[in-house]
C-alpha cells in the first residue's frame, strides 16, 4: 500500500519518540503542525491529509525558514542558535528531493532563455517565472535568480 508523505512523517514521529531523538521529534511535530495549518488554510478538515505535492511545498517552506534563521543568527553572532536550526534543517532535508546543481540550473536556464528568445533584462521576469514554474521543488529559487541575473547582464 502506498503511504503518503504526510502519513510517513506522522509514523516517523512515533519512531523518533521510541528512539528518544529530541531534535527529530521536535522538527517533525512542527512539520505536522504546519501541515495542519496548511489544511485549515485550504478550508479542509484539520485531521485530513495533504497530497505529496502540497506536503513538499510545506516542507520547502519550513526548510527556507530554517535557512533564513541560520543566516540571521550567524549575522548576529549567535552560534548557539545556529546549531539548533542546522539540526532541524538536516531533518527536513531528509524529506526533500535532491536539488539541482548550479551547473544543471545554468544549462536549464540557458536553454529556456534561447527557447523564449530572451536577449535583454526587460524580459527577466518572464524568464524567471517560466523557469521557477518548471523547477518548483527541484531548484533553490535564490540560485535560479542569481543565474538568471548573470545570463542577462
Image (cartoon, rainbow, N blue to C red):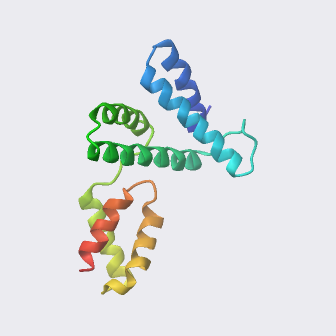
- Residue 30 visible in the snapshot: yes
Place of residue 16 in the rendered image (x, y in percent of width and height, measured from the top left): 48, 20
Q: Give 60 or 65, whichever is nearer the viewer.
A: 65
Q: Residue at x 70, y 46 (%)?
A: 40
**Drawn side of residue 94 relative to residue 153, left or right:** right
Place of residue 117 in the rendered image (x, y in percent of width and height, measured from the top left): 35, 86
Q: Residue at x 26, y 58 (%)?
A: 102
Q: Residue at x 41, y 69 (%)?
A: 131
Q: Give 6 or 143, whichever is nearer the viewer.
A: 143
Q: Residue at x 68, y 45 (%)?
A: 39
The C terminus appears in which quarter of the rendering? bottom left
Q: Quadrant of residue 115?
A: bottom left
- Residue 4 visible in the snapshot: no
**Drawn side of residue 132 relative to residue 73, left or right:** right
The N terminus appears in which quarter of the rendering? top right
Outermost residue to the front: 76
Amino acid at each position: 500500500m502506498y503511504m503518503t508523505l504526510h502519513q510517513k512523517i506522522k509514523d516517523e514521529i512515533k519512531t523518533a519518540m521510541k528512539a528518544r531523538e529530541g531534535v527529530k521529534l521536535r522538527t517533525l511535530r512542527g512539520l505536522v503542525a504546519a501541515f495542519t495549518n496548511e489544511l485549515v488554510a485550504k478550508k479542509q478538515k484539520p485531521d485530513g491529509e495533504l497530497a505529496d505535492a502540497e506536503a513538499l511545498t510545506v516542507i520547502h517552506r519550513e526548510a527556507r525558514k530554517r535557512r533564513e534563521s541560520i543566516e540571521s543568527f550567524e549575522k548576529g553572532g549567535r552560534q548557539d542558535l545556529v546549531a539548533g536550526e542546522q539540526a532541524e534543517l538536516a531533518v527536513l532535508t531528509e524529506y526533500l528531493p535532491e536539488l539541482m546543481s548550479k551547473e544543471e540550473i545554468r544549462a536549464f536556464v540557458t536553454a529556456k532563455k534561447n527557447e523564449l528568445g530572451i536577449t535583454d533584462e526587460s524580459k527577466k521576469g518572464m524568464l524567471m517565472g517560466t523557469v521557477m514554474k518548471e523547477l518548483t521543488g527541484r531548484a533553490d529559487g535564490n540560485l535560479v535568480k542569481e543565474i538568471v541575473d548573470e545570463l542577462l547582464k
